[in-house]
Image: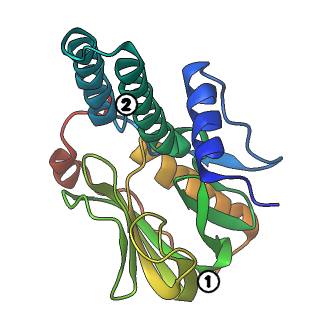
Amino acid sequence: MTTPGWWRRLAALWSWALRRSFRPAAGAVALPGAAGSMAVPAAFAAATAVEVAVLHLVVPWLWLSVLLAGVSLWSVALLLGHVALDAVHPHTIDDAALTLRRHGEVVAEIAVCSLAGVVRRRSLSAETGIDGGTLTLAGTDGTNVEITLTEPVSARIPPAFSAPGARMPIDRVLLWLDDAPGAVETIRRAVTRAGAGRATISHPAPPAMDQSFGPPAT
């Protein structure tokens, strides 16, 4: 039986609020990429709180005031939960595959031996989806890691941006990772451990190029 979407969102929000750490499968390493994603929803929640207070003062019927407040708070909880899914279900990598997720759903599972290159490359595009064989999983500040593949693999179009379940071939990934230098090194080590000798994993960009990254994300 499929778990309802609203329940998954509330469960994710609860885990995020309690600061419950994600536990990847044995041998896997988490690659978080949700830093700063709560800023806009938090601002929306604050505005909603003000709205609820105003409604309580201007609506003459208590039952209607309570109903409107309940609907507003429910909407905020679902929005925060939707964003929290990325925080509690990060990308992961082990010796077999790189698993990419969006909103708690697996978007693509890429065999480590199919990784051709990984570099730090900054893009300010905040779009998320699949276009021209490129899967983009942007954060609030765009993307900061580029991964190329030796051959196309099937990826699911991220939920909430297109028809759910639709799949398309990709040979390139642009995504945001909170610790880009550490993530690039982690991916390189995974390829080395897997013995993927034919995969050429690029080294991080030299210091002159790293300047385009600006200060570390907080």
Find the distance from the CA under tag 1 to the CA under tag 2: 54 Å
| Closer to the eye: label 1 or 2 | 2
User: Which residue sits at x=25%, y=27%?
Assistant: 43
Q: Position of residue 82 (x, y in %)?
A: 48, 44
Q: Is residue 182 visible?
A: yes
Q: Nearer the viewer, residue 7 or 135?
A: 7
Residue beneath disc 1:
198
Q: Nearer the viewer, residue 61 or 6?
A: 61
State how many labels appear: 2
Quarter of the image holding residue 128? bottom left
Q: Secondary structure at mark 2?
A: helix
Q: Position of residue 142 (x, y in %)?
A: 26, 54
Three-letter amino acid code of the residue under disc 2: Ser
Q: Secondary structure at mark 1?
A: loop
Q: Nearer the viewer, residue 104 or 173?
A: 104
User: Which residue sits at x=47%, y=77%?
Assistant: 163
Three-letter amino acid code of the residue under disc 1: Arg
Q: Residues within 10 Å of mark 2 (few under 14, many from 20)?
A: some
Q: Residue furthest top?
A: 57
On screen, residue 77 versus residue 46, left or right, reads right
Residue beneath disc 2:
72
Q: Nearer the viewer, residue 1 or 103?
A: 1
